[in-house]
Amino acid sequence: MHKSLFLLVLFVLSISCKRQKENTAINTSKEQTLQYDLETNQRTYTIETVVDNISNPWGMTWLPDSSMLITEKSGGLIHFKNGEKTEIKNVPKVYNRGQGGLLDIELHPKYAENGWIYMTYASSEGVKKGGNTALVRCRLKNNSLVDIETLYKAAPNTTSGQHFGSRIEFDNEGFVYFSIGERGERDVNPQDITRDCGKVYRLNDDGSIPIDNPFVNEAKAKKAIFTYGNRNPQGMAKHPETGKIWIHEHGPKGGDEINILKKGANYGWPIISYGVNYSGSEFAEATAKPGMEQPLHYWTPSIAPCGMDFVTGNVYPDWKGHLLVGSLKFNYVELVKLKDNEVIGREKIAEDVGRVRNVKMGPDGFIYIGVEGRGIVKIVPN
């Protein structure tokens, strides 16, 4: 073969191999997942492992030194700092059954001053067997929780493993919100304000009842209730501009919803729904009814949403201001595109990352994803 022809063949083979390598570089292993722009076939971001070997990372938050606190549904609390995981001691005993366990975690907005950490978990505290969702606050000292205070405990306990909720968020006025699912009692709890479950609650940061809560003057009502008619909210976030609290919640087969919390509002479950029974049969009277809120957005089919946050900062300029929602069912994060509180588009990101239990913006401006059976990963733009 002529030398020039031989070199040309080597060049072509080199380019072909390089392109083949680039086109097959999507790696869904524990180390990283690469995503591509379909038009240019160029990588747009990398998904990098931050904390590995966590079975079910339900909640996560960051301390002022940028270290992380991560809840394990089974009952463990992990402090991750400088690449090392430390198991925190004296964590309240959880009722680890079905969807219940150690759930969300959030710092007080003035944590640097008061050191308060808030957590929700399935608690067996009470006279009946089983458990129900509780909100506590505590402090961290020498790798142990201290000053633990129960701020709210839903009742009654039940051995059902369904629909504990639960997410926590603070608003700009310092009120703390948390959600509790209807515990599988759809025809009993959500529409009854004298009963716990199927609600979003609002408390003062010390657990006392705000004087302007919507049902404080109702004789038999649960005074902490802020909204009702909710099914199982597992996503909650404060809008970075309006300060409003947004939630998403599971529907049955279809009918997952995004809602903006309104004081005293009824979100309709199970009277109205865009979903159906898991068997496919209908159960709701209608999809709309006077006095019941319509969702900002709903999914049919269901994506099984879990975890939620707004994109802020300048790391992802094209995504800024939009909403992140994790999907347990389809193993991706959905970017819900917004304009003036209206959903104008949807985009799948971090596809095939695994069952997404949580998604949050970190203090460094990166998106962090809690993935079942994997741990915590983050999206790094290329």
Image (cartoon, rainbow, N blue to C red):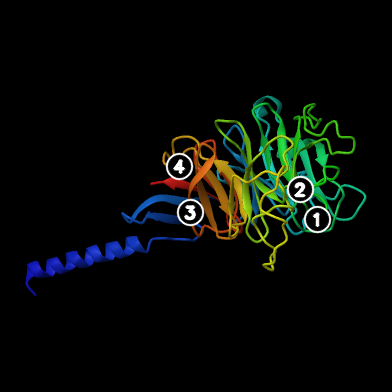
Per the rendering, the mark at residue 304 is none
Q: Are marks 4 and 2 in contact (CB under 8 Å)?
A: no
How dense is the environment of label 3, judged by Cα within 10 Å: few (below 14), some, or many (20 and up)?
some
Which of the marked residues, 2 or 1, is nearer the chain's N terminus? 1
Which of discs 4 and 1 lies nearer the camera? The answer is: 1
Which of discs 4 and 2 lies nearer the camera? The answer is: 2
x then y, percent, for residue 295: 62, 46
Which of the marked residues, 3 or 4, is nearer the chain's N terminus? 4
Q: Foreground: 283 or 348? A: 283
**The residue positioned farthest toward the right in the image shown:** 127
3D distance between C-alphas at marks 4 and 1: 38 Å
Where disc 1 sits, the SS reads: loop
Q: Is residue 162 left or right of residue 297?
A: right
Which of the marked residues, 1 or 3, is nearer the chain's N terminus? 1
**Residue beneath disc 3:** 348
3D distance between C-alphas at marks 3 and 2: 29 Å
Residue 281: which quarter of the image? bottom right
Give the amino acid type for the residue marked by disc 1 in the picture: Glu
3D distance between C-alphas at marks 1 and 3: 33 Å
Give the amino acid type for the residue marked by disc 3 in the picture: Lys
Give the residue drawn at x 64%, y 28%. 172
Which of discs 3 and 2 lies nearer the camera? The answer is: 2
Q: Can the viewer see residue 105? A: yes
